[in-house]
Image (spheres, grey):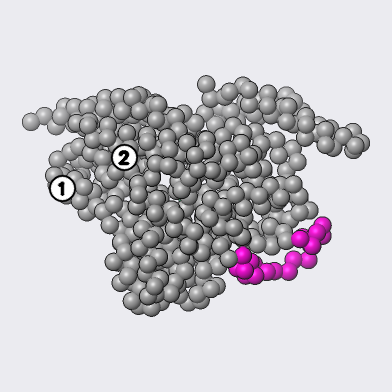
């Protein structure tokens, strides 16, 4: 069920083709003890069974999306060469493929001459963007919303840049009035605008933030690690659409192909609109640049060795499904958006659940109905466990009670935070599995209330 056997056939065929390119070399075949490998691999496969079924549509929890088969196959194929995209010496073909991917990713944001490269993930990509931001605005502050990724504060700490977080409005977006207040102090160098925050999927109001630049001077970095691809979708709300269209006006963008881009882990990306920031990366290494005078990816990256495999997998995916509005890849995103909206309305119709804000992207956050926030939290934890035992896997999010009761004023506030359930419906197939998902949820929520009644006889 997890494996389409055709994948293995396609990999074998592609490997033979790859091998034929090296047929001039004298015969050399790596040797190993088949029985020993087989025994270890059997053990590995058994150990790996202790994972949630991330590949399955009934995994509707964290931000985990299986790679596309073409990405998985291309990644595996490249491992027989094992290119290193630090320099052309280590990965000539895969470096060229990486540069092509970068151009296509930047084109999605309306940029035609970007500087950028793949990274180990969004955190490393954000680190590079904030490092450059700090070099351009030395001593000045970085600000990001309370719902921005937790790593921005820590990255700023690592870089020695002062950091402040900004309040969010009840829809989870950065509060523009609060931003304006912080700007009064005159020490803000960079605003991190999150295009789809990890907890709630809310998109910060980029058009309003841009307007603040009429009276204030600051740099904008867009953290679009999770939400970056949604600009291709035809299903965005108008205000969200406007924010995505404005990405062309920011200075740097982070997007994670390993989030919504159908890639295996280890694939983030940082893009700079002005290629001149490449000069900050200048360094002199005595041993890395022998094969060409051309710019190496290693000269514009903080990391040295990087997996060429990531570039190969991403290139294959973008080749199969170009990043175009109206294309197959965009249709997958439309399906996720539609699934999230439909899920929200089914939860609203259920007597057991109280969804919070309308999903702006494909994340749905919902409380379990209860008279007060403490009971709602306990029920959410029970539903989380009970659904898992029935093969439905959710995530939980701890939200400030003040935010939750703005949506659910009928709930008495008797705790500082509320445990809510959270589902990232980031597989296009989720749209077809809502019946199963909602049925299990309702069964488990009814059980959660029943067992409570049974355990507190009155
Ligand atoms: C996931 C995420 C990150 C961190 O990216 P990693 O790839 O996990 O390192 C940063 N920002 C946002 C908005 C994210 O969703």
**Seen in the image, is 228 located left or right of residue 81?**
left
Predominant secondary structure in magenta? Answer: loop
- Taking the view exactly as shown, the residue that stands out farthest to the front is 326
Q: Is residue 395 visible to us here? A: no
- For disc 1, the neighbor class at 10 Å (few under 14, some 14 to 19, many from 20) is few
Note whether residue 454 is visible.
yes
Q: Which residues are magenta?
A: 275-294
Q: Nearer the viewer, residue 62 or 47?
A: 62
For the C terminus, give its image quadrant. top left
Q: Which mark is residue 409?
A: 1
Establish if 207 lies above or below 141: above
**Residue 363 location in percent, x, y?**
37, 42
Residue at 50%, 75% (x, y): give it. 137
Q: Which residue is mark 2?
A: 421
Q: Is mark 1 within 8 Å of ligand 1?
A: no
Question: Helix, strand or loop at disc 1?
Answer: loop
> Which residue occupies 22% across, 32% down?
349
Residue 451: x %, y % from top left:
20, 28
Front of the two marks 2 and 1 = 1
Q: Magenta span has 126?
A: no
Neighbours of disc 2 within 10 Å: few (<14), some (14-19), many (20+): many
Magenta residue check for 291: yes
Q: Is 415 positioned to the left or the right of 29 in the image?
A: left
Q: Is residue 438 above or below residue 415?
A: above
Between discs 2 and 1, the one toward the N terminus = 1
């Amino acid at each position: 069920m997890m494996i389409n056997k055709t994948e293995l056939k396609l990999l074998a065929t592609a490997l033979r083709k790859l091998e034929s390119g090296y047929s001039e070399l004298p015969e050399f075949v790596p040797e190993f003890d088949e029985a020993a490998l087989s025994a270890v691999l059997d053990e590995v496969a058994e150990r790996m069974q202790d994972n949630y079924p991330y590949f399955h549509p009934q995994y509707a929890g964290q931000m985990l999306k299986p790679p596309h088969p073409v990405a998985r196959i291309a990644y595996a194929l490249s491992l027989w060469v094992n290119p290193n995209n630090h320099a052309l010496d280590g990965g000539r073909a895969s470096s060229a493929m990486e540069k092509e991917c970068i151009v296509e990713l930047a084109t999605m944001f309306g940029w035609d001459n970007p500087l950028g490269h793949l990274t180990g993930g969004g955190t490393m990509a954000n680190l590079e963007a904030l490092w450059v931001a700090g070099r351009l605005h030395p001593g000045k502050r970085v600000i990001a919303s309370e719902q921005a990724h937790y790593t921005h504060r820590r990255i700023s700490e690592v870089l020695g840049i002062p950091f402040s977080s900004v309040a969010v409005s009840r829809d989870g977006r950065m509060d523009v009035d609060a931003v304006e207040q912080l700007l009064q102090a005159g020490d803000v160098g960079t605003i991190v605008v999150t295009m789809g925050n990890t907890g709630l999927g809310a998109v910060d109001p980029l058009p309003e933030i841009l307007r603040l630049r009429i009276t204030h001077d600051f740099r904008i970095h867009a953290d679009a690690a999770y939400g970056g691809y949604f600009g291709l979708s035809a299903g965005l709300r108008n205000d969200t659409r406007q924010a995505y269209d404005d990405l062309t006006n920011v200075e740097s963008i982070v997007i994670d192909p390993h989030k919504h881009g159908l890639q295996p882990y280890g694939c983030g990306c940082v893009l700079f609109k002005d290629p001149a920031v490449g000069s900050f990366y200048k360094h002199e290494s005595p041993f890395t640049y022998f094969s060409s005078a051309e710019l190496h990816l290693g000269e514009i990256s903080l990391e040295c060795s990087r997996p060429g495999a990531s570039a190969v997998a991403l290139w294959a995916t973008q080749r199969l499904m170009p990043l175009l509005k109206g294309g197959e890849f965009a249709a997958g995103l439309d399906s996720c958006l539609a699934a999230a909206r439909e899920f929200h309305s089914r939860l609203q119709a259920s007597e057991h659940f109280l969804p919070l804000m309308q999903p702006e992207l494909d994340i749905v956050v919902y409380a379990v109905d209860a008279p007060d926030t403490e009971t709602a939290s306990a029920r959410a934890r029970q539903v989380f466990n009970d659904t898992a035992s029935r093969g439905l896997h959710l995530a939980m999010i701890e939200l400030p009670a003040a935010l939750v009761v703005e949506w659910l004023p009928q709930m008495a506030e008797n705790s500082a935070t509320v445990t809510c359930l959270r589902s990232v419906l980031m597989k296009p197939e989720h749209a077809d599995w809502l019946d199963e998902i909602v049925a299990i949820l309702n069964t488990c929520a009814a059980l959660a209330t029943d067992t409570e009644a049974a355990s507190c006889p009155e």
